[in-house]
Image (cartoon, grey):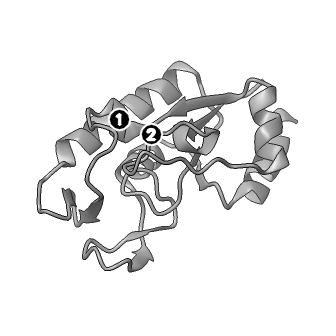
């Protein structure tokens, strides 16, 4: 059975910057969890950032907090850890949290801390895609389901 790398917050783990979670309750996601397919990671925590932590956003190739602290190194370290985990488990695809500076797949915040989203991808998503992984957001489960059906044959 093919494995799926997922954002830990989607599994209800309280790893977000605000100590929150955003559990994905879609029946398909829960079924994949019950089947043992899901491999969780929070790139930001694995990269060395605490819970809670200051909100951060991408500004070009950098990731900075609202106070201007550069946390790019931690985000890159977390992205590398996600890539290692994906390779280790030979995951078929990836489901990450939309809008996150690590995990966003279609949109991220624009770096102005004004709650403005723009087309873009997080640091982890970018690295995984560069290495050939298909990365989806939690709101793209229709596409995930189709891809799993194709892969599982």
| Disc number for residue 85 | none
Closer to the chain start, of discs 2 and 1, is 2
Q: Quadrant of residue 58?
A: bottom left
**Residue 50 at x, y percent in the picture:** 28, 37
- In the rendered view, would you say 82 is above or below 85? below
Distance CA(mark 2)–CA(mark 1) = 7 Å
Which residue, given by chain and number where applicable, does mark 1 sit on? 45
Left or right of residue 24, residue 115 in this image: left
| Disc number for residue 15 | 2
Quarter that holds the N terminus: top right
Q: Who's the residue at 27% across and 35% down the image?
A: 77
Q: Who's the residue at 32% across and 74% down the image?
A: 110
Q: Are marks 2 and 1 in contact (CB under 8 Å)?
A: yes
**Residue 147 at x, y percent in the picture:** 76, 48
Left or right of residue 91, residue 31 in this image: right
Q: Residues within 10 Å of mark 1 (few under 14, many from 20)?
A: some
- In the rendered view, would you say 134 is above or below 100? above
Q: Who's the residue at 83% across and 34% down the image?
A: 152
User: Which is closer to the viewer, label 2 or label 1?
Assistant: 2
**Residue 52 at x, y percent in the picture:** 33, 44
**Residue 6 at x, y percent in the picture:** 58, 39
Query: Is residue 118 visible in this depiction of the protein?
Result: yes
Camera-nearest residue between 120 and 56: 56
């Amino acid at each position: 059975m093919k494995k799926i790398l997922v954002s830990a917050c989607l599994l209800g783990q309280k790893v977000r910057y605000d100590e929150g979670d955003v559990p994905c309750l879609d029946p398909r996601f829960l079924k994949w969890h019950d089947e043992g397919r899901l491999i969780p990671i929070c790139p930001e925590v694995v990269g060395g950032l605490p819970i809670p932590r200051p909100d951060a956003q991408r500004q070009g190739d950098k990731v900075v907090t609202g106070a201007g602290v550069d946390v790019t190194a931690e985000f890159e370290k977390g992205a590398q850890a996600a890539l290692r985990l994906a390779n280790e488990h030979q995951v078929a695809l990836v489901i990450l949290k939309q809008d996150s500076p690590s995990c966003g797949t279609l949109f991220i915040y624009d770096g102005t801390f004004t709650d403005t989203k723009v087309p873009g991808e997080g640091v982890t998503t970018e690295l995984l895609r560069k290495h050939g992984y298909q990365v989806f957001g939690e709101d793209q489960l229709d596409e995930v389901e189709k891809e799993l059906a194709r892969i599982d044959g």
